[in-house]
Image (cartoon, rainbow, N blue to C red):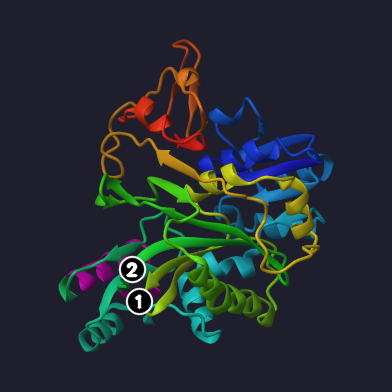
Amino acid sequence: MNILILGGGGREHAYAFSLVRSPSVHKVYVCPGNGGMKEICTCIPFTSNSELVSFSKSNVDLAVVGSSEFIARGTVDSLLIAGIPVLGPAADAGRIETSKAYATAFMVRHRIPSPLSQIVSNLKEAEEFIRQNQWVRVVKCDRFSFGSGVAITQNDDETLAAVKQFLKAHGPPLILQERLTGMECSYSILTDGNQWVSFSTSRDYKHAIDHEEGPTTGGMGSVSPCPGIVTDIEQRIRECVVEPTVSGLAADKLSYKGFLSLQLMLTTQGPRVVEFNARLGDPETQSILARFRGDLASLLMDCAQGRLDSTGSEVAFGKHRAVSVVLARKGYPNEESCDPKIENIDTIKNSTAFFSGADWLASEKRWRFKTFPKLDLEAILGCNPEFLLYL
């Protein structure tokens, strides 16, 4: 089969890397992709939903959603209307990620463990609620914000400042939440709306500097499976979080076929859902798919066509473990004035490099990236044969 992957980052490169190895795959397209993917797949530009549908009718058997941007802009809906199988939710079901307010109401409605929350629509409403509820220490904007729509605060003044900033930058509504403490992790599943299979656990590391210091980023690395999740904790996640989520989507008559990642905080009171990703996370995908064993393309097609034949089982990972590390440009995420470059990629051994924002500078015979390394690669790569680099 021919597969189209929607997105252009490290997650989509990891999808492509796994799918081209599936025995049932003939060709992989990525839209829009990036220069680092061109050796294994064909990158095509995105101009409009209608042009992408026209291309897919003649060339694509299955579309796989990587970036939620394609959910929000209605691309998935357009492909589904055209009769093209899609691994990823349509816009209505995708609101579980693209609208934090919708996700908050969904979790309350279906009794899914989550932080104490309040949705507010203006500054006056927010000020009054914060004054009466001093547990509010997290502010989130409603819409997709490329990792910039969450603020964790220390006091009421910081909380109100974040509210004002987000109302100006993103508009209403905003979500006010308590700050949970515990271990963060992700539990990922693949569901056709009725059945679901586990895609294991993972943990990402969001702070820019070692030892969980520095500003929050979209993710500086990940490990899968997540250390510390023992059998009884995983069983509780399945029973208290996954089952009511899948059942809730069905009860709300939402057609959800695809990956769903539940971002969790493991508190002393049990797992709590911090947010949903209507896809595998990034950079968690890089670690998760490095462990996968089997025909990924056939499994994804079965899911897209509503043919998953088991519930709660885990796909083939065995005892494999994987780690990914993001190599970020100097000063990331606040300062991006330098001209980054990475050379000698071909010397990296026992690892796989996934690219994001890559350009090949033919005249200089080197890659130019949004990122550049400042790590002892030889020491790192020698510690794990499943090690991944996300560039």
The residue indicated by pointer 2 is 182
Q: How many marks?
A: 2
Q: Residue at x 63, y 36 (%)?
A: 17
Residue 356 visible in this rendered orientation of the protein: no
Q: Which is more toward the observer, 138 or 189?
A: 189
Asked whether disc 1 touches disc 2, contact meaning CB atoms under 8 Å apart, the reply is: yes
Going by the numbered disc 2, the residue's amino acid type is Gly
Callout 2: 10 Å neighbours few (<14), some, many (20+)?
A: some
Q: Quadrant of residue 126?
A: bottom left
The picture places residue 49, in percent across and down from the top left corner, at: 68, 50
Residue 364 is marked as none
Q: Residue extending furthest top?
A: 363
The residue indicated by pointer 1 is 268
Callout 1: 10 Å neighbours few (<14), some, many (20+)?
A: few
Q: Secondary structure at mark 1?
A: loop
Figure quadrant of the N terminus: top right
Whole-angstrom CA distance, mark 1 to mark 2, is: 7 Å
Residue range in magenta is 158-178
Q: Which is more toward the observer, 129 or 326?
A: 326
Figure quadrant of the C terminus: top left
Going by the numbered disc 1, the residue's amino acid type is Thr
